[in-house]
Image (tube, grey):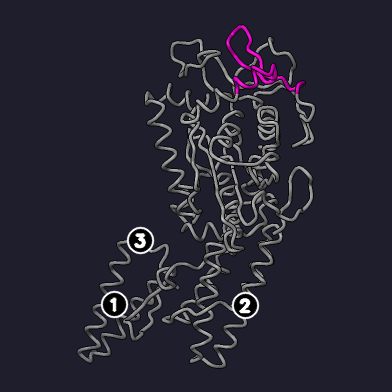
Amino acid sequence: MYIYDSVKKTKLPFEPMVPQKASIYVCGPTVYDDAHLGHARSSLSFDLLVRTLKALRYEVTMGKNFTDIDDKIIKKVQETGQNLEEITTHYINQYLEDMKALGVLKSDIEPKATESLEAMESMIQGLIDKDIAYVVSSGDVYFDTSKDSNYGAISHQVGDDKDNQSRVEHTSQKRNPKDFALWKACHGEDDICFNTAFSKGRPGWHIECSAMIEKHFKGNDEYSIDIHGGGADLLFPHHENEAAQSRCATGHELAKYWMHNGFVNINGEKMSKSLGNSFFVKDALKVYDGEILRNYLISVHYRNDFNFNEEDLLNSKKRLDKLYRLKKRIAPTGASKPNKVFQKSILEAMSDDLNISVALASIDEMISETNDKLNANQKDKGLKKETLANIEFINELLGLGGKEPFSYFQIGIDTVTKTQIESLIEQRNEAKKAKDYEKSDAIRDKITAMGIALMDTTDGTLWEKI
């Protein structure tokens, strides 16, 4: 397995701390709103990583956090009148539902910031004791970046003091402009606060991930985890600051490898709330099936920026249609074992820093070759069994092709229309039993006019959208 390390800016062989075991931590969402396509892209990128490692027989431990205390969440509390837990629980559940619809495997560890406050306090206090962090008169606690000689080594950049450094207000009492908040003291009556030895307040953005990793993962003397991942926008300042505070608190590096997925653009424009083009996953799922969205979103290499537009999505669906048409063609049959040459080709592609383009090309080639062989010998049961095993392997590795093929081709038909079609099919069957073939043909023509194709099989009449 080779992965591209964002820090060293090159592809490296994956050599985990413990042979055949992989520990991964990915920065999750701040739960004040619904998941958007940027969240989906990140989740799918690292879902492919997890699936690939598992296919390579690694024992994988995957962690993804939920930031459930933040200024944006507090603002939502003030705007809605709901309490913190009501808001965050709603958006966490919605996020998990959206990711499940996209076929994202559930993480092994899903810590919340509010459940990790003790770990954060302990890490902050340790940094204060070393004089690497300091408390100002307001009660805020800052990390002294001048005390970390390696600060900047993760992102290879050190920006100016901006809001995204800490996601809380700043103070002129900082020792250095680049120092970032570990803890923000509360002063207003409406603030949501937690008690600590240094002040009553709430955590800064960066400290939670470092504390959660130390709480939930067992590293070694060199690293806390094997792989730390997230969107490219997190490289600086978030991951830079995580690495600095963890390095100084533990005496070793946070992660052996750093991986980052690219941005999502909508029709060529970077997705952001300020541009008004944030595309919520839940809205996309109202129009497109989750597997169809998944197929589209994983079709571009995870490190590249992704330009989302519906024309490309529909073109991408044609590739998935071919897979399901092949699956329909070999049904009903049982699986044997996947073709070793095909299995090796697709797994080698994904082992090369998740080279999805080569993997999908291998699938296209398998579909084309199998269809040619079936055209020559439609009754080749051994080929059908092997083909189904190939498709099951694709589903295991890429999360594609797992549906029953006829139900896949019914996607997009509303419940009322489905009921109407089923009723017409039943009427046609009754007409055929009565040998009223004129009526039977008339009903079939009516169904065809609805854009539906019928297939009479030994298992009954199946239908799909044309």
Which residue is disc 3 drawn over? 414
Residue type beneath disc 3? Asp
Image vertical order of residue 115 relative to residue 319, above or below: above
**Residue farthest along the left direction in this orientation:** 434
Residue 137 colored magenta? yes
Q: Is label 1 in contact with label 3 (beta carbons under 8 Å)?
A: no
Give, as a single range, the part of the protein colored magenta: 124-147
Name the image quarter holding the N terminus.
bottom right
| Residue named by callout 2 | 340
Image quarter hosting the C terminus: bottom left
Q: Earlier in the sequence, mark 1 or mark 2?
A: 2
Could you tell me which residue is drawn at 68 percent across and 49 percent down?
305
- Quick one: 46 or 199, which is closer to the camera? 199
Few, some or many residues within 10 Å of mark 1 (<14, 14–19, 20+): many
How far is mark 1 from mark 3, CA to CA?
17 Å
Which quadrant would residue 51 be assigned to in this image? bottom right
Of circles 1 and 2, which is in front?
2
Can you tell which mark lies on residue 425?
Answer: 1
